[in-house]
């Protein structure tokens, strides 16, 4: 098992435990991690159907009394990462007389994780929290670092907090049931961390991307371990995102704005971030911050994801999936640039009215730039659309 310790402060640390098949032994691990045996599992119907019984059986084997364990399901989808779902969960916790010693377990992808984390942070000013991330994106990114949030219709992740879990248990085996699209969403965030911090990891991703897309078990395991280590390194240098950690937002200024404009439907977070990386790289290129060769590398690796990431036109890479891509392409084609700019002005990274993007300079080097202007965003977007034949 790979164990990575996240030591946030002298008296606050937790472990990310990564092991194939760990879900089966989770009851045993959890019995050592949490004090009270009362647990509420929060999941959605799909993940519950796939892994709910497995988790409950494992808890039983670990000595937990199943009468003290409840499972609450919420609907599947980013649009449920909202204050109204959080309210539904508060109601359910109150109905069950949940007190401060009850542990919340988030069993699911980034949506379940961020939402459960937000509820754990706020209900009675804090409940013990355990993550069992079940998507690649949640395993490599959202379960690490303690950011919890819900979305607002006008701005993504805008209502949130920092709240650390007691532990994260990551089982790469569960990735075998993920859709191709969600494998790609996770790879998009892994590419992001590679661009930010590790040219070697970027090269490894380039070399192995075809096998990763086919869900090669050992390679996915390697990917998760490396991406988590890289993210933990960054988080530990700046746990509360007062400076350095902002680099993790490469691709996310444009990405989040696109998600808001799509009303958190049709366009997934991973797709939005991949688009964001392409457009933000174009802005960096137009500013002369990065080379044409670097932009080519970013375009090449992201084009591997395009055939079912569904945001790029078929002609860019393959022809087969054209119809599936139509709805998202129309969103991008018809995007109102003024509205997009308005959304960008509400981004969390902005400071005293200055729009801040994280722009890349080279593999392993990105920087915050706080004088982004509307014209350059429009120009990059227009160029992007032409280049990918979206207009
Ligand atoms: N907190 C952070 O630091 C952070 C970082 C990155 C992303 N995020 C957030 O993460 C969210 C996106 O997460 P996501 O991509 O995991 O989306 P998601 O949680 O919606 O999961 C994607 C889909 O996969 C399904 N699924 C989950 N596990 C599965 C499995 N093992 N097998 C089959 N299907 C499975 C889900 O039901 C869902 O339909 C966004 O809201 C984003 O803002 C947060
Ligand atoms: Zn992200």
Image (cartoon, grey):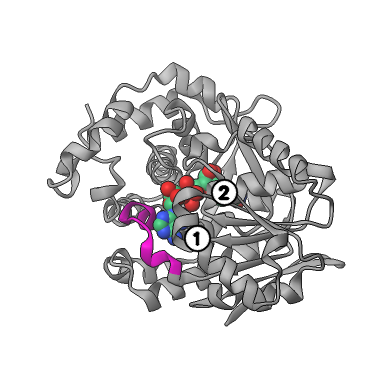
SS class, disc 1: loop
Give the alpha-carbon distance from disc 1 to disc 2, as whole Å: 10 Å
Which quadrant of the rendered structure holds the C terminus?
top left
Q: Residues within 10 Å of mark 2 (few under 14, many from 20)?
A: many
Image position of 380 (left or right of 141):
left
Q: Residue furthest bottom?
A: 1
What residue did someone put label 1 on? 134
- For the point 54% across and 46% down, the residue is 111
The answer to whether residue 89 is visible is: yes
Between 45 and 192, which is closer to the camera in this rendering? 45
Residue 68, picture quadrant: bottom right
Q: Which residues are magenta?
A: 174-184
Q: Residue at x 49, y 69 (%)?
A: 224
Q: Is residue 202 left or right of residue 107?
A: left
Q: Position of residue 261 (x, y in %)?
A: 45, 26
Dominant SS of magenta comes to helix
The relative height of residue 30 versus residue 186 in the rendered view (above or below) is below
**Who comes first in sequence, dot 1 or dot 2?**
2
Which percent across, then down, holds residue 108? 53, 55
Mark 2 CB within 8 Å of ligand 1 = yes
The reply to whether residue 191 is in sight is no
**In front of the other: 332 or 135:** 135
User: Badge 2 is on which residue?
Assistant: 112
Secondary-structure class at tag 2: helix
């Amino acid at each position: 098992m790979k164990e990575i310790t996240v030591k946030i402060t002298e008296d606050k640390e937790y472990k990310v435990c990564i092991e194939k098949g760990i879900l089966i032994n989770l009851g045993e691990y959890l019995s050592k991690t949490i004090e009270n045996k009362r647990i509420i599992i929060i999941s959605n119907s799909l993940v519950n159907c796939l892994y709910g019984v497995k988790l409950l059986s494992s808890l039983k084997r670990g000595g937990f009394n199943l009468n003290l364990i409840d499972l609450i399901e919420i609907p599947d989808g980013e649009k449920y990462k909202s204050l109204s779902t959080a309210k539904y969960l508060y109601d359910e916790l109150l109905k069950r007389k949940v007190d401060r010693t009850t542990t919340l377990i988030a069993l699911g992808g980034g949506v379940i994780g961020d939402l459960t984390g937000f509820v754990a942070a706020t209900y009675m000013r804090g409940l013990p929290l355990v993550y069992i991330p079940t998507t690649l994106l949640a395993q490599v990114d959202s379960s690490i670092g303690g950011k919890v949030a819900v979305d607002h219709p006008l701005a993504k992740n805008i209502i949130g907090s920092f709240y650390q879990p007691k532990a994260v248990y990551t089982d790469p085996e569960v990735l075998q049931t993920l859709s191709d699209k969600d494998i790609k969403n996770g790879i998009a965030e892994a590419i992001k961390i590679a661009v930010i911090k590790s040219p070697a990891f970027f090269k490894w991703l380039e070399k192995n991307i075809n096998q990763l897309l086919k869900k090669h078990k050992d390679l996915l395991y390697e990917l998760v371990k490396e991406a988590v280590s890289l993210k933990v390194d960054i988080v530990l240098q700046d746990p509360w995102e007062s400076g350095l950690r902002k680099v993790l937002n490469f691709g996310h200024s444009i990405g989040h704005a696109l998600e808001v404009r799509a009303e958190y439907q049709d366009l997934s977070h991973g797709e939005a971030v991949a688009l964001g990386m392409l457009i933000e790289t174009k802005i960096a290129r137009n500013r002369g911050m990065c080379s044409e060769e670097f932009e080519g590398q970013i375009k090449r690796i992201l084009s591997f994801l395009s055939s079912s990431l569904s945001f790029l036109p078929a002609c860019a890479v393959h022809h087969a999936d054209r119809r599936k891509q139509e709805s998202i392409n129309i969103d991008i084609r018809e995007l109102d640039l003024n509205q997009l700019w308005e959304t960008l002005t509400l981004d969390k990274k902005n400071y005293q009215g200055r729009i801040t993007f994280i722009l890349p300079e080279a593999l392993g080097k990105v920087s915050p730039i706080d004088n982004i202007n509307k014209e350059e965003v429009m120009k990059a977007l227009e160029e992007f659309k032409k280049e990918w034949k979206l207009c």
